[in-house]
Structure formats: structure tokens, C-alpha cells
Amino acid sequence: MNCPKCEAAMEEKRFGTIKGTVMFDKCTGCNGFWFDTGEVEKIKDAWRPEFIDSGDPKVGKEFNKIRDINCPRCDTKMDQVTDPKQRHIQLETCKEHGVFMDAGEFIDYTNETVMDIFRDVVAILRGE
């Protein structure tokens, strides 16, 4: 499987949790992630998310600008979604197969901070 953002090869990774072993795919180029449906929920509360998401968030922000991508499993156009709890996190999802996260997004997704809540309130007030 190739990365839907940079076309580099995706490498299958394993992460053990108390809920069992989760397998996901990490891009060898941009360090983005492909999580099959249900995988991200199983590891969201991982003790050390930086063991999973070791990519440079600055690189991830650049690749996050590429939003019009196809699912690496079925090659259909993915939906562009905003995380409802952290509105600054923008993801690409395939209803059938899973979600793509850019480098740095998984750590951000797992660590909601007071600043995230404040930023989202301001965005709502601005109508964004």
C-alpha cells in the first residue's frame, strides 16, 4: 500500500495495548498514518503516543494542506472531516476502510489541552 499523500510505501506496524495488539500503517516518506476502521480508537489512550507518532509535526502540517486524496484501500475519494473535540485537527476518512492522519496529528488527537478547548471556543465564536 502507498501513502495517499506522498505516494511512498506504507509500512505495517504493531502496537500492543491492554486491549490487544493493534496493527496500523506508517508512511516511510511523510510519516503519516493509516488506521483501519476502529484501530485509532483502540490506541487513542496509549500511554506514550510519541512511540507511535514520531514524525515531525511541521512536516505533517505541510502535508495536511493536501486534502483531496483517495483511500489507499479502495481508491475512492476520502471525506475531509474536522475532529469535533479539537476543531483544528483535520483528517481524511473513508467510510468503508479507515482514517489517514498526518505526522503529529495522532499525538495532538490524543492530547486535548486547555489551549485546544480555548482555541476551539474562539473558532466557534468567529464562525469558523
Image (cartoon, helix red, strand yellow):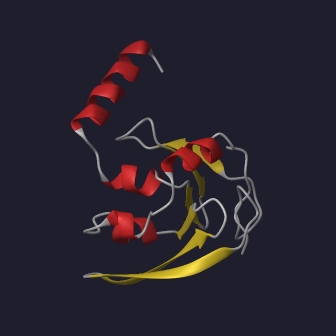
Q: Please report the residue visible at 49 percent of the width from the left and 49 percent of the height from the top.
A: 57
Residue extending farthest top:
126
- Residue 28 picture quarter: bottom right
Number of labels in the image equals 0
Residue 119 spot, x, y in % from top left = 34, 27
- Residue 101 picture quarter: bottom right
Residue extending farthest left:
114
Vertical side of 27 occupied by 83: above or below: above
Q: Please report the residue visible at 43 percent of the width from the left and 57 percent of the height from the top.
A: 106
Quadrant containing the N terminus is: bottom right
Q: 78 left or right of 38? A: right
Q: Nearer the viewer, residue 84 or 6?
A: 6
Q: 120 left or right of 61? A: left
Residue 83 spot, x, y in % from top left = 44, 44
Residue 8 spot, x, y in % from top left = 73, 67
- Residue 125 picture quarter: top left
Vertical side of 110 occupied by 41: above or below: below
Residue 52 spot, x, y in % from top left = 42, 69
Q: Please report the residue visible at 65 percent of the width from the left and 39 percent of the height from the top.
A: 65
Q: Please report the residue visible at 59 percent of the width from the left and 59 percent of the height from the top.
A: 95
Q: 105 left or right of 4? A: left
Vertical side of 105 occupied by 18: above or below: below
